[in-house]
Image: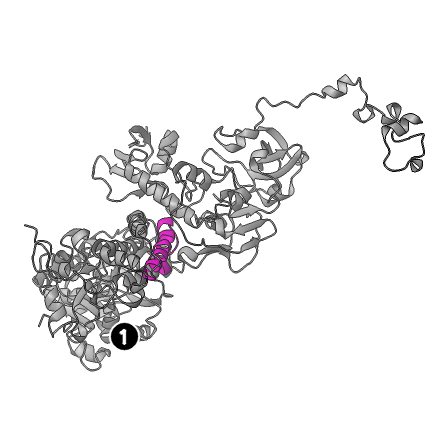
Amino acid sequence: MADAPKLFKVTIDNISIEVEPGTSILQAARMIGGDVTPPAMCYYSKLKGSGGKCRTCLVEVAAGSTADPRPMPKLVASCRTNVMDGMIVKNITSEKVIDARNGVVEFLLINHPLDCPICDQAGECHLQDLSYEHGKEGTRYEFPKRVFEKHDIGPYIQLHMTRCILCYRCVFLADQLTDKREHGVLDRGDHSEIATYIHQALDHEFIGNVIDVCPVGALTDKTFRFKNRVWFLKPEDAHRECSNPNCCGKAVLWYRGDEVYRVTARKDQWGEVEGWICNECRFEKKKTSDWVIEGPTKVNRHSVISQGHYVGVQKPPEVLYEVLDGRKPKLLMNIHDVSEVNEPGIDLSSIQGPAHSTDFDKG
Amino acid sequence: MGKKLLLEKAHVENIRLYDVYRREGGYRSVEKALKTMTPDQVTDEVKKSGLRGRGGAGFPTGLKWSFIAKPEGVPRHLVCNADESEPGTFKDRYLMEFIPHLLIEGLIVSSFALGSNTTYIYIRGEYAWIVDILEQAISEAKNNGMLGKNILGSGFDCEIYVQRGAGAYICGEETALIESLEGKRGNPRIKPPFPAVKGAWDRPTVVNNVETLAAVVPIINMGGEEYAKIGVGKSTGTKLISACGNINKPGVYEIDMTISVEEFIYSDEYCGGIANGKKLKACIPGGSSVPILPANLLLKTVKGEQRMMNYESLSDGGFAKGSMMGSGGFIVFDEDQCVVKHTYTLARFYRHESCGQCSPCREGTGWMEKILKNIENGKGKISDIDLLWDIQRKIEGNTICPLGDAAAWPVAAAIRHFRDEFEWHVKNPVECLNRNYGLAHYADPLQVVA
């Protein structure tokens, strides 16, 4: 009998959990769930090599392991640090972590345009959530913000670098999902930008997924831009037989009324895509008849999207129609039956000046 | 005169040529190591010597070498970090330019110790002419059987390649250097895994500074224990210091780490005193990233002891009252220099060189630069000084690589030691454009802590 692999016991904010060796602190925290889970802006479990860049998931390691209980000198990125047996991690119980995280949020926001009112990502933006939880109401930054031109990368996607937080997710996605390297990061420091070299189109059947992995509104769906706000839309799970063998065919249709405004991949509770969908499913199939509807998507009730959710909502009955005994509303009343105002039996041109009711009475 | 190990022969005529270098006793260490020693013995000698990395961090080299993973069938690499871009540091340039064979010799011995058959020199792009010097030295060494297959009949093969960088400071960070060497964008990697386990092309890799690798030559020649006798404490051997700023004799000096800072600045053998008879105001003892020290703290430690030019003494007092040996870029400021302007210049440098990968460094360096620009130009506010302090505090330690720390430390130290100068700038917005704060009290004797 093969021995079961030894599990590592890790304690995060005084909550213990046993996880398999090789699990990152962030993954262990997600297993626990709730408030102890550090936020992650750049880490994406489906993308190899992602993480470690945004520094929002920093945690304090109070004891490295049972064998070596020394604390780690610096805060570590929980997404890229693997647990050790007996590790003690402090997330929200550490003032150092909270302080550093507030700092990171401030850094992320100083050059962010904060144009949420006109941004398509608003309502499902990770940066918005992060700043609600960890940001301050004021800013200490008094300088002009960095701005970039908008770029159309291909027929479906628009890149608005001004909003980008350089999480590199789209770069990893394009590297890993597509067979040739199509875009990357130009320049360095605070003027570095995500770009195709140079101003080329991203042309790949799966490239639409960069919209889903983008945590902010930097990469948006051109077929959906400015069409609607996400919280007015009602998400429905749906699937279809996609001819592309690599496409999972499972998606979320975003309805308003009977119209499908956009199609996205399904996301789990951490905002990560469950299966990649191809461009055809995403951009071309915007009719209900293209899809098999499975039912309403479960939306976290803390999300603003849940305000337009289906639960308990019924279409109002056509009360007026019944009251009118089957008559069409527009035939409710023929004004000419009750009034002669528009067909007066008097010659209006014979009246001097404005007509008065008395003029008609005379007739 | 201190003992010279590295630059002793640097000024022999035509030392750049193999024949001359060989006649002056060069490549003895290769013969000794490859013919009479095992790789582990070489590593042991380096361990015994107490040699510390000369690139800035001062990590013991022998220990670093012993960490390298040795999986079966996987090639290992030694990479020489010649991406010397720290402002104020130019010692490696001098060494490579004047005595290139010393580096090649050190590389062969170190490659032998680490089992690296393919060794790279990653050199900064701006050192274009040094590439030619190194490549000529490599081809000469190869023609004379010191490189290539079966060196000196020992069965050890080694090739050295020179790779030019494209002029990024960040590529001096070892993992960014490896990325750049692989042909990728020079973004530092997230550690672990460390390069000693997974470095270039996922193979075990050791990255060492030029001076460190050159220092292996005298260690093998004279023996590790003998080398350890030079210097004091954990600061063994000799160190190249590149002195610049307001001194009479700027240049590269080899010191044996037993002299005091005062002697180094004022003796005619070294810097020759402050230029134009001015007074010393401040100094950065180890390259632009390390904390700046005012004159009084530079010459004496808080305990009232003479501050020496070695790793321990320079870092005595921690970051609050001390600094670091760093890479040996010794920048001296006289009474006419403005610390605010200098800090602004450094902030501009780090903003420009931040790779932009992780948010605190990408956004924080730019922010600090803008605030410092305002203060320098008389548009600052008193609250800006505290804001700067808060920004640097939030960058330090929260970034992937040490560039964030390197950007934060100079600002922190400048505010810590020269806060009145910052305040004077803010309070005298017109005057600060026309004159500098001057020497002020920065050279006054310190109160000795009992």
Q: In the rendered image of this protein, does residue B19 appear above or below residue A80?
A: below
Tell me residue A55's x, y (percent).
Answer: 36, 45
* Residue in the image at 35% along x and 34% along y: A28
Decide if residue B80 is in sight here. Answer: no
**Chain ID of residue with mark 1:** B
Tell me residue A156's x, y (percent).
Answer: 60, 49
Report the magenta residues as a range. Answer: B350-377
Q: The disc labelled 1 sits on which kind of residue?
A: Ala
* Residue in the image at 46% along x and 47% along y: A169
Tell me residue B340's x, y (percent).
Answer: 28, 61
Mark 1 is surrounded, within 10 Å at the Cα level, by few (under 14), some (14 to 19) or many (20 or more) other residues, namely many
Q: Residue furthest bottom?
A: B13
Tell me residue B390's x, y (percent).
Answer: 30, 48
Quadrant hosting residue B144:
bottom left
The secondary element bearing badge 1 is classed as helix
Give the labeled residue for mark 1. B137
Question: In this rendering, would B172 be left or right of B238?
Answer: right
Q: Please tell me whether residue B355 belongs to the stretch shown in magenta.
A: yes
- Between A91 and B93, the residue placed more toward the observer is A91
- Between A42 and A138, the residue placed more toward the observer is A138
Decide if residue B281 is in sight here. Answer: yes
Q: Quadrant of the N terminus of chain B?
A: bottom left
Quadrant hosting residue A321:
top right
Q: In the rendered image of this protein, does residue B121 appear above or below residue A337?
A: below
Question: In this rendering, would B20 be left or right of A159?
Answer: left
Q: Residue furthest left?
A: B450
Quadrant hosting residue B88:
bottom left
Q: Residue furthest front?
A: A352
State the predominant SS element of the stretch in magenta: helix
